[in-house]
Amino acid sequence: MSLTSSTPARPPGRPRSGVNDVVFAATLRTVCELGYARATVERIAAAAGIAKTTIYRRWPTKGALIVDCLLDAFGPVPVKGGDRAEIMASAIRWAAAKIGEPGVGDAFAGVFSDGVSDPGLREILSSRFQDPYRLALQEALGEPEHRVLFFIDVVVGTLLHRMGMTGEPMADDDVDALVEMVLPSFR
Amino acid sequence: MSLTSSTPARPPGRPRSGVNDVVFAATLRTVCELGYARATVERIAAAAGIAKTTIYRRWPTKGALIVDCLLDAFGPVPVKGGDRAEIMASAIRWAAAKIGEPGVGDAFAGVFSDGVSDPGLREILSSRFQDPYRLALQEALGEPEHRVLFFIDVVVGTLLHRMGMTGEPMADDDVDALVEMVLPSFR
DNA sequence: AAGTTTCGCTACCTCTGGTTTCGAAACCTA
DNA sequence: TAGGTTTCGAAACCAGAGGTAGCGAAACTT
């Protein structure tokens, strides 16, 4: 009998060093310190203690690196229990808190704006980042796709606009106002 | 008696050629055709039929050019007559229509994202672009500053997020949904 | 020991924002 | 018409960023 499927025949050659977590941390740290534009791939690599070429061996573009970094930073959306209003409110507060974490909002806004004029990056952002959360919310809320997309546009768009215009994440009482604005239109 | 103040003693030397409108049109056209990132200053100048240096003589950075171009494209916000709900609804639809015009949404999202990591550009964007509209809305709506800022975050953020994620402006029925979501929280 | 893959390093290319330089053109005044 | 002042277009140029190529060394498996 062959090996179990959980050890799927490691491919030959030198294995990749497990530096993904180090790279993600270095990415957020560098973006937080220098801003998105000055957080070059070379600087991120230096902060992670690896070579720039190693990053380009794992992520095809800087945008793809940022998207994976954001996926790692956000993790799954909390949709456990409660009624729909509670799920939506907790999702909004969760998004606001994550975007407020150091570097996350900057990285998000930066990659988002890069995607405006880069269809390839927009595809990555939409399929790898937005779609999983959209699907989870569709299932948890029982809302049709276009309503969930609208919900995401409002919540994320508002939070990013505040971050982009002021450089600061949205304060808690404005997040409260956002919750109270959004919930009634979905009841 | 000296000349009237309406002809304020033209300064000596060759006068500037009146090409601002041509440059604005060329900017939107180029952004629309190539996207924000590929709409280089050199290409914009070529589309306008002038030299790149002429652009840099009038605008200190590409971001400042885009901001002026957007100011020209948006014009003043319509706040005439009606009750507050009508004013807010017409402002939302006006913003959606402007952002949907060819090149405008791309340019807006592009300069917005550049500002994320460029405090100087963010200052230009905030003071020259957002503030005039904020003040006009404050006066027309009688709302305090932070409420109007929140209103702008929601409306513009939502519209730009849709534009950035899909590459297309928001459809009319979603704009309707946005109006119906925002208005009740301001009554 | 052989084979395969990844590593770090360096050098390199392309593109973009932005600056500098310089001669020519346009305008005013005398 | 001559002189002064400013802008124009053209070209060369610079710095920084994304991304690629080539190389020898290191880390695994068999």
Image (tube, coloured by chain):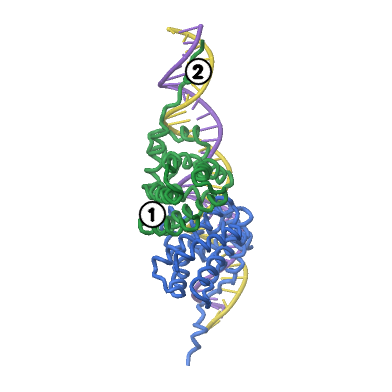
Chain colours: A blue, B green, C purple, D yellow
Q: Is disc 1 placed on a helix, strand or loop?
A: loop
Local packing at callout 2 (Cα closer than 10 Å; few below 14, some 14-19, many 20+) is few
Task: Give the crowd class for mark 1: few <14, some 14-19, many >=20 residues within 10 Å.
Answer: many
The mark total stands at: 2
Above or below residue B150? Residue A85 is below
- Callout 2, which amino acid? Ala
Horizontally, residue A140 falls left or right of residue A29, namely left
Q: Where residue A145 sits: x, y (%)?
A: 39, 68
Residue A3, compared with residue B14, is above or below; it is below
- Closer to the camera in the image, B121 or A36: B121
In the displayed structure, does residue B98 sit left or right of residue A25? Answer: left
Image quadrant assignment for residue B77: top left
Q: Position of residue C19 (x, y in %)?
A: 55, 35
Considering depth in this image, is B101 or B113 the residue closer to the camera? B101
Q: Amino acid at mark 1?
A: Pro
- Ranked by sequence position, the earlier of labels 2 and 1 is 2
Q: Which residue is mark 2?
A: B9
- Which residue bears the numbered disc 1? B169
Q: Chain of mark 2?
A: B
